[in-house]
Amino acid sequence: MLVYLENGEPAAPSFLGGWCHEVPTEPMHLAEELIPLWEAYVSRQADIDGDIDVAEFLQSVDLPNWVVFEITTYGMACGPVWSTAWTVLDLNDNEP
């Protein structure tokens, strides 16, 4: 199953949302079910002056058949570099 198109747009109907560690406050293409949960989490973090932790948020979401892929890549440029992305998919989606 193709999840992302070459331009970074979601390709899979089962795609529910994505995040990049560089801009954790700006999720990509959130499903309607995730929007109020994300907004409530961000609001709670603002109230306690806490950091946005995408992994923490996703662990708090309990919805059946959803799976989160957390992918971290490492490399070397002018020193070590890394990147983490989170992708949420609905594994119960029967569309191709």
Image (cartoon, grey):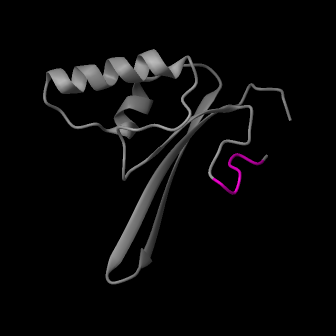
Residue 39: horizontal and vertical position, in percent? 37, 20
Classify residue 37 as left or right of residue 50. Answer: right
- Tell whether position 41 is magenta: no
Residue 86: horizontal and vertical position, in percent? 50, 44
- Write the residue at 62% across / 51% down: 8
Q: Residue furthest left?
A: 49
Q: Which image quarter: residue 10?
A: top right
| 74, above or below 22, in the image | below
Q: Which image quarter: residue 54?
A: top left
Q: Which image quarter: residue 41?
A: top left
- Write the residue at 47% across / 20% down: 35
Residue 78: horizontal and vertical position, in percent? 33, 84
- Write the residue at 79% across / 46% down: 1
Classify residue 26 as left or right of residue 62. Answer: left
Q: Residue furthest right?
A: 96
Classify residue 23 as left or right of residue 65. Answer: left
Residue 73: horizontal and vertical position, in percent? 48, 65
| 77, above or below 15, in the image | below
> Looking at the magenta stretch, what is its main secondary structure?
loop
| 43, above or below 1, in the image | above
Between 91 and 35, the residue placed more toward the observer is: 35
Total marks placed = 0
Classify residue 21 as left or right of residue 88. Answer: left
Between 81 and 64, the residue placed more toward the observer is: 81
Magenta residues, start to end: 2-7
- Tell whether position 4 is magenta: yes
Q: In which quadrant of the rendered image does the C terminus lie? A: top right
Q: Residue furthest bottom?
A: 78
- Write the residue at 40% across / 81% down: 76
